[in-house]
Amino acid sequence: MSRKPELLRRKEKIAGHYRQILELLGEDTTREGLLKTPERVAESLLFLTKGYGQDPGAILSSAVFIEDYKQMVIVKDIDFFSMCEHHLLPFFGKAHVAYIPDRTVAGLSKIPRIVDVFARRLQIQERMTTQIKNCIQETLNPLGVMIVIEAQHLCMQMRGVEKQNSITTTSDFTGAFNQAKTREEFISLIKS
């Protein structure tokens, strides 16, 4: 079965539900500004959650090279956008990823791609941090991995406590990053 008809069916179903939601909010879904809103929201949601249909391990392993390099590799300031699974509001920020290869390095563009795969799912920041770490550890089997994510959450800024300038930072690490000295080097390098 082709994937396109399935996506079209899902889009139509989501749009129908959003039409009902708009009506429940008291809106007139026949007015000009809202005529195509359900379809636009459905397309948007399918894009924002496209990570469910992607295999991050396969993406990362598609560009793996044998290299005798055992120093820290860092890809920092990776912009990402995600959706909080609790309120379906965006959270966004930067991911900083480091690993210490054990004879296997990945193509550098693959690191931001796997960040996007996990970000493009309904998420919480803590889980996303661990998922990125686990994917790199399981796929590359490096000497260690460390992830730091800094994000702003609209569920905290637009509603609830309404703290517009708050930043949430999460981290997770394995292997060589269990040593404080290695973690400190990574933190120093991402702040520079």
Image (cartoon, rainbow, N blue to C red):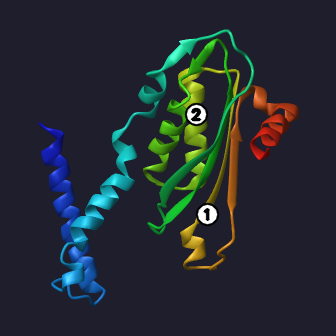
Name the quadrant containing residue 88.
bottom left
Element under disc 1 = strand
Judge from the rendering whether residue 16 lies leftward or rightward of residue 72; answer left or right. Answer: left
Going by the numbered disc 2, the residue's amino acid type is Asn
Going by the numbered disc 1, the residue's amino acid type is Gln
**Closest to the observer: 140 or 174?**
140
Look at the image and tell me in which quarter the N terminus lies.
top left
Of tags 1 and 2, the one toward the viewer is 1
- Mark seen at residue 14: none
The single residue placed furthest to the front in the displayed view is: 192
Q: Residue at x 62, y 46 (%)?
A: 95
- Mark seen at residue 152: 1
- Mark seen at residue 134: 2
Q: Using a 10 Å C-alpha cutoff, classify the residue at mark 1 as few (fewer than 14 neighbours), some (14 to 19) or many (20 or more).
A: many
Q: Is residue 79 above or below residue 16?
A: above
Q: Is residue 35 above or below residue 49?
A: below
Q: Residue at x 18, y 86 (%)?
A: 31
- Going from the N terminus, do you reach mark 1 or mark 2 first? 2
Judge from the rendering whether residue 136 lies leftward or rightward of residue 1; answer left or right. Answer: right
Judge from the rendering whether residue 86 lies leftward or rightward of residue 11; answer left or right. Answer: right
Q: Position of residue 121 (x, y in %)?
A: 43, 51
Q: Residue at x 47, y 67 (%)?
A: 89
Element under disc 2 = helix
Q: Residue at x 12, y 47 (%)?
A: 5
Q: Position of residue 50 (x, y in %)?
A: 35, 47
Look at the image and tell me in which quarter the C terminus lies.
top right
Spatial distance from mark 1 to mark 2, Cα to Cα? 23 Å
